[in-house]
Amino acid sequence: MLTFHRRVAPIFTLFVLACAGRAPAPQAPAPTPGPDAPVAATQPPAFVPLATDGGSGRHPWQVGSAGNQLRQAIFDGAWTAVRDKHFDKTLGGLDWDGLRRKYEPLALAAPDEPTFYRLLNEMLGLLGQSHLQVHGPGEEPAAPPDEIPPPQTRTAAADAIRDAGDDYGDPGLLVRIIEGKPTITRVRPGSSAAGAGLRPGFLVTHIGGRALATLPPSGRALRPVEERFRLRQLAARRLAGLVGSRVTLRCLDENDRPIEVMLERDPPRSRAIQVLNMSPVVPEVTSRQVGEVGIVAFNVFLLQPVLGEVQKAIDGFRAHGTKAIIIDLRGNPGGIGAVVIPLAARLSTAPLTLGTIVYRDFSNTLATTASLGIKPFAGRVIVLTDEGTASTSEIFTAGLQEAKRALVVGDTTAGAALGSVIEELPGGAVVQIPVADFKTPKGVSIEGRGVQPDRRVFETRAGFLAGHDVVLDAGLELAKASLP
Amino acid sequence: MTIAILVALLAAAPAETALRPAQAILADYASAIGGRAAWKRLHSVHIKRALIVAGQGASGSEEHWATADGKNLTESTLHDVATFRQGSDGRMAWSQDPVFGLRKLEGAEQEEARINGAWNAEPDLASLYLNVKSVPPPQEVQAEAGTDLECVELQKKLGKPVVLCFDAKTHLRAFQIGVQPSPGGDIPYRLSFGDWRTVKGIKTWYLEKMIAGPTTVEGRITSLVFDEKIPASRFKMPKP
């Protein structure tokens, strides 16, 4: 009568994350010139902010940098969590005790917090896997001098945003690596970036005064798609910051003329959500219909509110007699892994197995079941991918592709498809640990490999300058070709 | 000399010979939690729990209602994540969650629901299972217990058996080890129990810790009310 172990299955299922987008925590503030100086600009998180520390108004990373005791506790916590929870008990055959002996003194003696975290991540990086990282206060180097803090003028609107914890935004552009160069691929209408005249196809050389061409050192060699994924994340991180603060952007326009603009960070369009220690994210679901083809795009796998809105869009397409659906997962870094089950169930009239999650001591199948009152969509399904399609997005895509339920159009995905948990460490740090491998029903591992598209589409700078979305165009062509 | 040999032989005897019969262990448990008579006086229960997912940035709440005629409903919410329900109208068990939707439970899941939903079966646990037998304490819990344990294995009609371990001194439940059937396969779990309190003559645990794979969830009772009037409509399966 009293036990709650009947909830083992749903609770357990929900807490396994497949999200490759966990952002570094924001940095410690740069030294301020005096007591009356404005709040120092901070290096922003990848999306939007962490929660504040219980009402003081300060973010956790503003409390101070990690002392040696704290560093020791963070190192111990991360090292032990990986040893005890990693899905591979052998840790790839690495001498984990030996690595501790090597890295612990180096990390504890690091001259600053960025070096401490870099060394810790270098040790974790030797496992050569995604979903394995430590982040914490002070991890990012000091903010560059050409960052401009937000104005001190208080407005009711700005206060309301800050009260909601949604005081981080971005200037409204997406930077990806196209033909080997950081390129603006999307500009949000009405954003600061749009107001400054930035357009898709412009090349980006510097953000906030720092060159964008190279990544911070990694503990292991990165695959090309991984490099592009990380540079994309790095650009997003540098662009995000306190609403109202400004960041410089140096670009080459359509004629390769250098331009420099100062962009203000716009407020987020809706409230940020933070669940299960993932980075806060502003969920976005968009849907539209082009002829007999429905298109739905979303930027994270969450139960609330994303799943319901995507299901509603699919149901709406089905009700309107749509013959094909395009699911746009470009730039979607994953989220709660279990969301793939109800989503796939909406797209398959027969029971469908997407693959197996292999934990340390047992396995669990990602299989759809017949839910009462659900009418699945039976038409053609196309999934759009790029280098930012990661983790849960890859599990979903790989499962549908192998079951021949969807055609995949775009680029190879990130190859970061493991189940993970994000655990708290002392001092506001967190460690993400891969607790499960993923294999498709045919036993294919997507980690380190990615999903290969059925139709590969190469994006070019010229295409972006001309205003084309060649991946979507290819998806639409394929969808329409199948229509009776 | 003879005594010394006898002591040595006893010490070397296999542990199995020292196990008490399962029925005796369960009878002691029934007494320790207040006895059958105290439990039989109850007609309904309404429990509220607070849930904390250790170190993973999540918490939640849970409510459970059950009545003597076998109806029950459990509604669990993990804040900002999901709400899930499981219930029975006394004949048919169902489940509703955002992952698998609304469905009638069948097979091993139905059997699990039958056992979990049985009204006040704590003093009569053996009656819920096909058979019971004493087993040595599993290593994984003996080390953690810090006290002697007595364990029984209970075989369900369907699915894998569950092992219950009791504190050999207090005879109260200490651990439960089993697997939870799910649409994706069996999920191994381990429960531990603590903070025992007496309410209306029965003794029950207020603290329950579940470990399943890398996840640890702690449930703590915040309110427990017996014999509250609960309308039958509460236990109806939701409409699709």
Image: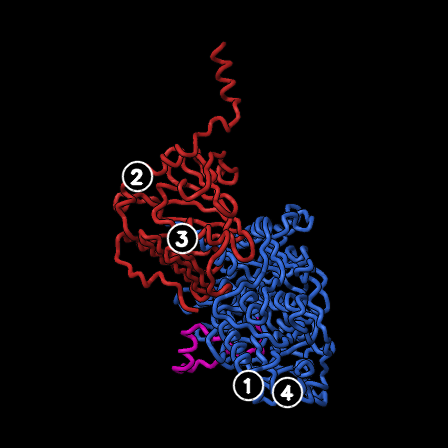
Chain colours: A blue, B red
Q: Of marks 2 and 3, which one's residue comes earlier in the chain?
A: 2
Q: Is residue B9 magenta?
A: no
- Camera-nearest label, 4 or 1: 4
Q: Which mark is residue B156?
A: none
Do the CB atoms of the residues marked 3 and 4 lie less than 8 Å apart?
no
Q: Which residue is mark 2?
A: B35
Report the magenta residues as a range: A143-169
* Position above or below: A219 against B198: below
| Residue drawn at point x = 47 percent, y = 35 percent | B133
Q: Which residue is mark 1?
A: A192
Amino acid under disc 4? Arg
- Camera-nearest label, 2 or 3: 2
Do the CB atoms of the residues marked 2 and 4 lie less than 8 Å apart?
no
Task: Give the structural element (helix, strand or loop) at label 3.
Answer: strand
Is A10 left, or right, of A483 in this rendering?
A: left
Q: Residues within 10 Å of mark 2 (few under 14, many from 20)?
A: some
Task: Give the structural element (helix, strand or loop) at label 2.
Answer: helix
